[in-house]
Amino acid sequence: GESVGLHLPTLSVQEGDNSIINCAYSNSASDYFIWYKQESGKGPQFIIDIRSNMDKRQGQRVTVLLNKTVKHLSLQIAATQPGDSAVYFCAENSRDTGRRALTFGSGTRLQVQP
Amino acid sequence: GAGVSQSPSNKVTEKGKDVELRCDPISGHTALYWYRQSLGQGLEFLIYFQGNSAPDKSGLPSDRFSAERTGGSVSTLTIQRTQQEDSAVYLCASSLARGYEKLFFGSGTQLSVL
């Protein structure tokens, strides 16, 4: 399939290093946040989510941090591998909007150098 | 099925023609979403179906776009009189719709309008 996000901000890391991908959101009423990974030609794949009553959640090699004070979300990937190369999207939802659909950010491309 | 299935995976059409894109959600998922992803962009919400409720059409960009979901399962997104700016990847997602939760995405349909 076609590559997406040709003009996205890019984070380049060495294999084995830790990666931090950042996301800012604007709606102070947002109460659910989620990170997706999208490889070329594929649909977004769930990585990890967090609700607003938490500030940190850990998964396998991934950690999501939420700072509601400054409306900032980050995804940390430990020991980054070549298979982690992809575009990463944050998304959020808010009970205020009454909409169930997630609102997505514009994405960050992660390039892992061997 | 095992995942969200979309067809066709690629569609090339001429400006002014109508196109239909199909989505088969995960069995048992009551919520279905359509998103559009243009090159270099994030995911743009189009429409949301939940059970027998009226769909949330707030993201449809013009009246040339419509969607239906028959029998609470398969959905079809129709674009009439296609324009070159309609060229994008059209992604379908489904979820159990038990509060806020992750969406499961298909691989998308790459639409090219010549």
Image (cartoon, coloured by chain):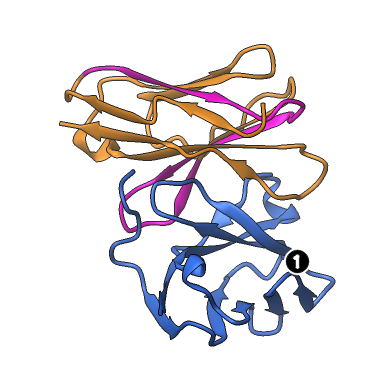
Chain colours: A blue, B orange
Residue at (24, 40) in percent of width and height: B85
Residue at (35, 68) in percent of width and height: A8
Q: Is residue B12 above or below residue B93?
A: above
Q: Nearer the viewer, residue B40 or A3?
A: A3
Say which residue label 1 marks.
A50
| Secondary structure found at label 1 | strand
**In this rendering, would B3 be left or right of A8?**
right
Residue at (62, 67) in percent of width and height: A27
Magenta stretch: give its range: B17-45
Q: Chain of mark 1?
A: A
Residue at (59, 82) in percent of width and height: A79
**In this rendering, would A50 be left or right of B93?**
right
Q: Nearer the viewer, residue A77 or B69?
A: A77
Return the x and y of residue A52 as percentages of the image width and height.
78, 69
Q: Is residue A63 visible?
A: yes
For the residue marked with disc 1, what is the amino acid?
A: Ile
Return the x and y of residue B57 as percentages of the image width and height.
54, 32
